[in-house]
Image: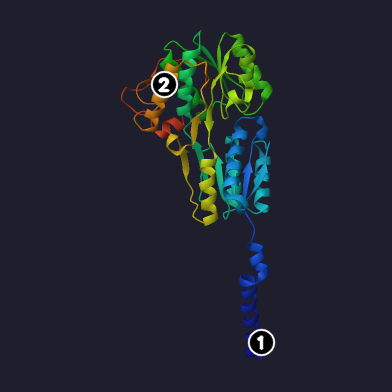
Amino acid sequence: MKKLALLLILVLVFTGTLIAQGSPEAETAQEGPFKVGVLYISSPGDMGYSYMHDVGTKAAEAHFGDQIEVVRMEGIPENDAAARAMEQMVDEGCGIIFANSYGYMDYMAQVAEENPDVYFEHCSGYLSDDNMSNYFGRMYQMRYLSGMIAGRMSKTGKIGYVGAYAIPEVIRGINAFTLGARAANPDATVTVVWTNTWFDPSLERQGAVALLDGGVDVIAQHQDTTEPAKAAIERGKYAVGYNADFRKITGSDNVLVSPMWSWGNYMIPQIQKAIDGTWESQSYWGGLEDDMINLSPISPLVPETCVQNVATTQEKIANGQWDVFWGELKDNTGKVRQSAGEKMSDGDMLSMDWFVEGVIGSTN
């Protein structure tokens, strides 16, 4: 009887295994599109940062078609709500999750640790794990080129910059923009105001208005909406956009140019790797060579000689002949931070916490 009972147990275990692995019910449970979670700091209607991320997401949807299903959550604050949103995405079966704002980093790291079978992709941060990558692009290169245009077009040499937070990403962009402006006009200055928010249309506009009241005639920005640019246009001044083509959005040629992102060029291959099971953790920082960044069409108000200078400089960057933070660099107190002939490392760029010569403002 003991042998018979043991035999029956083995048969039941074997049969149950077959049902779990090969039954129509089990196969049905595994069918369906691969789910992709996308977390946005603001609504894509901001026409800026989240808008361009959603353009990238839509590019992925067009590329994969019915093979994927996207779960979007937008307007999620950078607090515990972000962790809850990602946990909800995991519960809904997302196999890979993208989060588009710096402040999501610690929350994503926490959720990633708790869900080792899901892939996580964090934009603009620095943390990674076995199942979590960080990704960003060398936007400082486009900042430099747009600074060349701003420096050439400013009649006063006084340029304003509305910044979000005093973190390396934003500081690096301001520095690159200033170096570009001073390449066109060695006497140009860039005055910075901080809003301490990524997305607040009212504060962004107030920052731009304060700069315009102070006498600047070009407004640049590291903010999520078009409000700083609109404030400049309303005063008859120039603007440099960010994320999306602000000249197209506003309909004004006073928007000289906009540094832009191509997020889909990162998302599509990463989703494919997740589907294939070949995804690997990385710290990605792509540039012109990966078509991660680009400039919008330049305003017809910009002289052709300037347009050609920008194109020549962009080609040098793309070919690896030159980059923005090469050569002697002084900070805005006059201290030499890098000697002639030196090339700044990625590590130093990614941790930048000081302003170059020509910036009026503080990183504190």
Marks 2/1: CA–CA distance: 86 Å
Look at the image and tell me whether residue 147 can be seen.
Answer: yes
Q: The C terminus is located in which quarter?
A: top right
Does residue 278 appear to the left or right of 324 in the view shown? right
Color theme of the render: rainbow
Element at badge 2? helix
In front: 254, or 87? 254
Quadrant for residue 163, please give it.
top right
In front: 80, or 77? 77
Q: Is 289 above or below relative to 309?
A: below
Q: Which residue is mark 1?
A: 5
Quadrant for residue 30, please give it.
bottom right
Does residue 202 appear to the left or right of 322 in the view shown? right
**What residue appears at the point 42 percent right and 34 percent down from the top-left corner?**
347
**Where does residue 4 sit, x and y in percent of width and height?**
65, 89
Element at badge 1? helix
**Where does residue 283 sit, x and y in percent of width and height?**
47, 42
Q: Nearer the viewer, mark 2 or mark 1?
A: 2
In front: 318, or 355? 318
Q: Is 292 above or below relative to 336?
A: below
**What residue appears at the point 64 percent right and 22 percent down from the top-left corner?**
227
Crowding at dot 2, Cα within 10 Å, few <14 / some 14-19 / many 20+, comes out as few
In front: 116, or 99? 99
**Where does residue 249 sit, x and y in percent of width and height?**
62, 26
Q: Residue furthest bottom?
A: 1
Crowding at dot 1, Cα within 10 Å, few <14 / some 14-19 / many 20+, comes out as few
Q: The N terminus is located in which quarter?
A: bottom right
Q: Which residue is mark 2?
A: 308
Look at the image and tell me whether residue 127 can be seen.
Answer: no
Q: Earlier in the sequence, mark 2 or mark 1?
A: 1
Task: Specify the amino acid type for callout 1.
Answer: Ala
Task: Specify the amino acid type for callout 2.
Answer: Gln
